Amino acid sequence: MEPSSARRWRGRLLAPVAVSLCAAFALLAGVLPASAAQPTAPQPALTVSMTFGHEAAQSAQSAQSALPPDLSVRCSPGINKFNRTNLCWQDTLSFTFLENEEPVGESIVILYQYIALRPKLKTFTEYDTVGPVTSTGTTAPIEAVLTAACGSDCVATGGLRGTLKPGLTGTISYSSNLPRDDEFTRASDYTLDYDAPPYIPLDVGHWDTPIDYRCDNSKAINNTTGCVFEEFDPTLVLSLKTGGASAAMVAWAMVHMHEHWGWNGHGKPLSRLQNDTTADHNRDKVCDSTFHRIAGIGAPARGTKHPWTDTDSCDEFPFAATYESGATSISSGAACVQLKAVRTSSSTTADEAAQWGGVTTVGKVNLKASCVRGHIPNRLNGVVGSAYSGLISSARLANGDEFWIAFD
């Protein structure tokens, strides 16, 4: 599935960025700069210039692209792809060697950069590796130092240093130093200083991370600091095997209801509502006094080897802790489509999710209603709720962050 986050690229990242060579390029083109009337120092006889470019990254759930063997495991989820915590991309560094202002050779260096963020730690790491190097004409070995900066409330140390040849590697360590309840969203700013004796460099390389990362301290998740690529919409994966009728209710709503909540390619994503008071209000409104428990829902089949005690509970979708909750447009949960759990197995060895693994409608069905309300075994209701809480934590969903739903 292709998450919607790929649609939000900034235009400055969609095309290669050329480093200005100022008056040197004007001289190469045979055009004198505006200051030509003033005496100028002659150009060095041997010089080298650099241009830079990288492709726009594309969000991806998985799918590895072709990578050098030593990067095939590390560089997830593939070249020029990203997910919630990983970004891998390919840079092209082109060095033009000149003698008396005339090009005599070129070296093209492929650089792979990979950032691995941590949703619950203030530190994260970048790995840089030089890939193929192609030289034509007259050139010289290029000695380079790559460093990064990430702002006043973030520290970047380390880098890549040495001769630009296949296999050269470097590591950059980042640490965000945010005050509590603060956040930033930015890209790393890279600087490449290089030298290629006897050729004199005409410029310094500069570029940014192709995707901004967001770091916060206790804003998305209390008492933790972490970073994510917020442009990637993660997926909440629910299991019918463990969630039983509660997961089946969500699946029924995604497929049958007009809005197709959370169904990638068919509906819109859901978005986290972080305000607990509002979420409780949503839940109370959907599960109001019109909800009457049904006896027997959640009870084990007679003779079950390991019986349990469970009862009917009010389950709602979209979740109360999302901005899509139906509570915003109804006066009572009676306006939701009503479902109830059904027994799908009477095997005495089957667990609760297997015995109560399906749902059926109750009463009149309005597929354009703003919510679904279900009579679901309480324990299974909690399984799906815990899965959503787990996604909030693992993907560091902040208020308003979007997500999809899928089933294993």
Image (tube, rainbow, N blue to C red):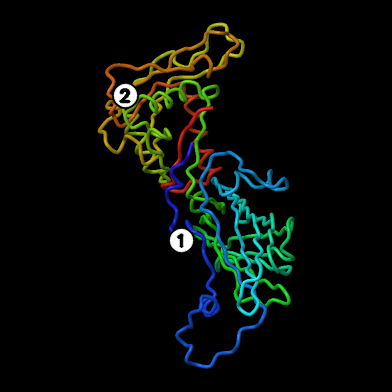
202 and 243: which is toward the camera:
202
190 and 91: which is toward the camera:
91
27 and 190: which is toward the camera:
27
Question: Residue at coordinates 43% horizontally, 20% vertically from top-left?
Answer: 312
Quadrant containing the C terminus is top right
Query: Which residue is most to the top?
Result: 303
The percent coordinates of residue 262 (x first, y second) are 41, 35
Answer yes or no: do the residues labelled 2 and 1 have beta carbons within 8 Å?
Answer: no
Would you say 245 lies left or right of 362 here? right
Which residue is disc 1 drawn over?
A: 12
Question: Residue at coordinates 37% horizontally, 34% vertically from top-left?
Answer: 267
Q: How far apart are marks 2 and 1 (CA)?
A: 46 Å
Question: Residue at coordinates 53% horizontally, 19% vertically from top-left?
Answer: 353
The percent coordinates of residue 69 (x first, y second) are 72, 45
Regarding residue 55, the answer to whether it shows in the image is: yes
Helix, strand or loop at mark 1? helix
The percent coordinates of residue 212 (x first, y second) are 51, 56
Would you say 183 lies left or right of 111 here? left
Three-letter code, disc 2? Val
Which residue is disc 2 drawn over?
A: 337
Q: Quadrant of residue 368?
A: top left
Query: Which residue is most to the bottom?
Result: 39
Which comes before the other along the chain, label 2 or label 1?
A: 1
Three-letter code, disc 1? Arg
Q: In which quarter of the image is residue 19?
A: bottom right
Q: Quadrant of residue 291?
A: top left
